Structures are given as structure tokens and as C-alpha cells.
Amino acid sequence: MEAIIIGIVVFALLILMWVVGTINRLTRLKNLVRESWAQVDVQLKRRYDLIPNLVETCRAYAAHERDVFERVVNARNQALQSGGNARDENALVQSVNGMLARVEAYPELRSNANFLELQRELSNTEDRIAASRRFFNANVRDYNIAIEQFPGSLLAGGHTKAEFFEVESVSVREAPRVTI
């Protein structure tokens, strides 16, 4: 009889340890998703800070391209207000790409040291955003798998699936084209 009670207690302790371990794993994964989004957010803010400088530099050389610059500024403001909404980020990248394509018509601007430095910074920032996005999406994948797979799904009651940060169109998938 004693052996049965000890067996039941050991089994109950194993179940309890599994429950605690699973809950802790889900919490750790959820925090990794939050942390990796914060890294994406830092890089997006860096891009938001670079764009006004790039627009002002371009505006000085190409005043009659005002509509292009306004689209970039409006897209930047929308993306900034949305807090990293993928659709708004895609629109921002498309408008910046459009502005950089128009700049090709101004050789004196393309040779301006300030413009070249801003282009380099923007290109580096886009690379950082891509790396941060990959890290974020990997953490989202791991978290979503953990809350959907059995037996973890039994304990994932308070956890909801996280959204991937995806790029919508092929033109947006590429960093803005930078000619140095």
C-alpha cells in the first residue's frame, strides 16, 4: 500500500514539474517575442530619424519633386504612428525607394557627401531591420509552435498567437537601392 502511495506522489510531482516547466517555457518564449520586437522597433525608429534628413537633403537639390518628398514624409509619419505595422512599413519603404529612384536624375545630389552618408546609413539600417525582423520572426515561430503543439497547448490558455512581421511585396522585400 505504501508503494502505491509513493508511486502516486512521485507521479503527481512529475506532473507538477512538467506543468511548471511548460508554463515557464511559454513565459520565456513570450518574453523573447517581446524583446525581439523591441529590437525591431529600435531599428525602425533609427530609420524614422534618418528619413527626414534624407528628404531635406534631396529637397534642396530637387525642389520641384515636392510630391515625392511629401509622400515619403506622410508614409514615415503613418508608420511612426502605427508602431511598426507591417503594411505601413511596406508603404514607407516603397515611398523611400521611389524617392531614391527620382534622385538618380540629379548627379550633383548623388555626389553630395551628406547625401551619400545618409544613403549609407539608410542601407545599413535596412540591413539591421532585416536581421531584427528575422530574429523576431524566429522567436514568433517558436512561441506559436509551443502554444499550438500538444501537450503545451493544454496549458497555453492565456497565450495567444503572435503575428509575424512580414513584407508584402517583392519590391519591398529588397532594401532601398542605394547608388554610391
Image (cartoon, rainbow, N blue to C red):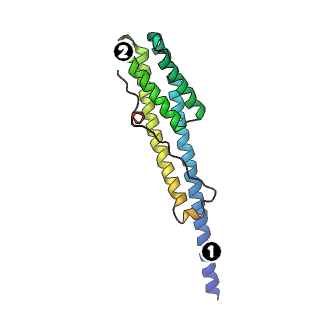
Query: Residue drawn at (49%, 44%), measured in percent from left and top?
Result: 136
Residue 106 as seen in the image, left or right of residue 162 = left
Local crowd size for mark 2, using a 10 Å CA cut-off: few (<14), some (14–19), many (≥20)? few
Task: Tell me if residue 39 comes above or below residue 94 in the rendering.
Answer: below
Local crowd size for mark 1, using a 10 Å CA cut-off: few (<14), some (14–19), many (≥20)? few
Outermost residue toward the bottom? 1
Q: Amino acid at mark 2?
A: Ala
Q: Residue 17 is drawn in which quadrant? A: bottom right
Q: Which residue is mark 1?
A: 12
* Label 1 to label 2: alpha-carbon separation: 74 Å
On-image quarter of the C terminus: top left
Q: Which residue is mark 2?
A: 105
Measured from the top left, where is residue 88 in percent x and y?
53, 33
Q: Closer to the N terminus: mark 1 or mark 2?
A: 1
Q: Name the one closer to the observer, 146 or 28.
A: 146
Measured from the top left, where is residue 99 in percent x and y?
43, 21
Query: Residue drawn at (47%, 10%), measured in percent from left and top?
Result: 63
Q: Amino acid at mark 1?
A: Ala
Query: Residue drawn at (45%, 25%), measured in percent from left and top?
Result: 96
Query: Residue drawn at (50%, 42%), measured in percent from left and top?
Result: 165
Q: Name the one closer to the observer, 172 or 1.
A: 172
On-image quarter of the N terminus: bottom right
Dot 2 lies on which element?
loop
Residue 45 as seen in the image, left or right of residue 116 = right
Measured from the top left, where is residue 95 in percent x and y?
46, 26
The mark found on residue 139 in the picture is none
